[in-house]
Structure formats: structure tokens, C-alpha cells
Amino acid sequence: MLSVVCKLTFPDGQEVTGKIEAKSPATDYPFVYTGPAERLKSQPASGTASDLELLFRLTAHREGATLTVERSGAYESRTEFIKRPEP
């Protein structure tokens, strides 16, 4: 499973963190926010790991915040998501 944690540090010192744990790059998974998430333009409840990172990158650019992204793990093998017909 891939885990992505994005952290924004705003010029006033406030921090917002968003986290996702995803098995697949193409499936939506829940986002978990900590800190004053209202500082983000939107706070979607779920999406892909790429969606979360894009949201935080755009906010960092717009608000002059510092972005830190930590990734660990990996997506599960695609073959686990493919149902093959029985011979």
C-alpha cells in the first residue's frame, strides 16, 4: 500500500496535513486532514494520491506555503485487481 503525507506550513506558522493510503493509483480513497483544513480552497473527502498532492501543491503556490511530501510503500500489484477467467 502506498502512503502519502502532504504537509503545508503557512507563513504564519499554521500547518495542515493531508494523508492517504492507497492500494491502486486509479481508485479513490479517503483523505485524512489534520490542522486548520479550512486553509485549503477545498477539502475533498476522497480522491487519488495524485489528487491529494495536486491540491496541496496548488495551495502552497497560491498561499506562499512550504510543502513537504512524504511517500512510503508502493501500490499493490495490478494483477490483484484483474479478474482472470478460469481455464
Image (cartoon, rainbow, N blue to C red):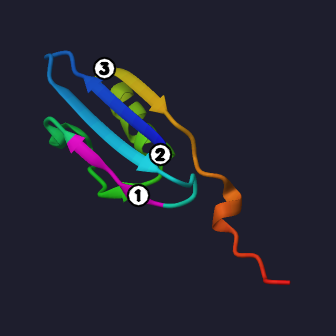
N-terminal of the pair, mark 3 or mark 1, is 1
Q: Which mark is residue 49?
A: 2
Q: Callout 1: few (<14), some (14-19), or many (20+) C-alpha neighbours within 10 Å?
A: some
Q: CA distance from mark 3 to mark 1?
A: 28 Å
Left or right, 61 with reference to 85: left
Mark 3 and 2 residues: CB-CB less than 8 Å, in contact? no
Which residue carries the number 3 mark? 64
- Is 16 on the left or on the right of 19, as rendered? left
Q: Nearer the viewer, mark 3 or mark 1?
A: 1
Identify which residue is drawn at 41% across, 47% down: 21
* Quadrant of the drawing holding the C terminus: bottom right
Question: What residue does disc 1 label?
Answer: 29
Q: Residue at x 59, y 51 (%)?
A: 76
SS type, badge 3? loop
Q: Are marks 1 and 2 in contact (CB under 8 Å)?
A: yes
Magenta part of the chain: 28-33
Is 32 magenta? The answer is yes
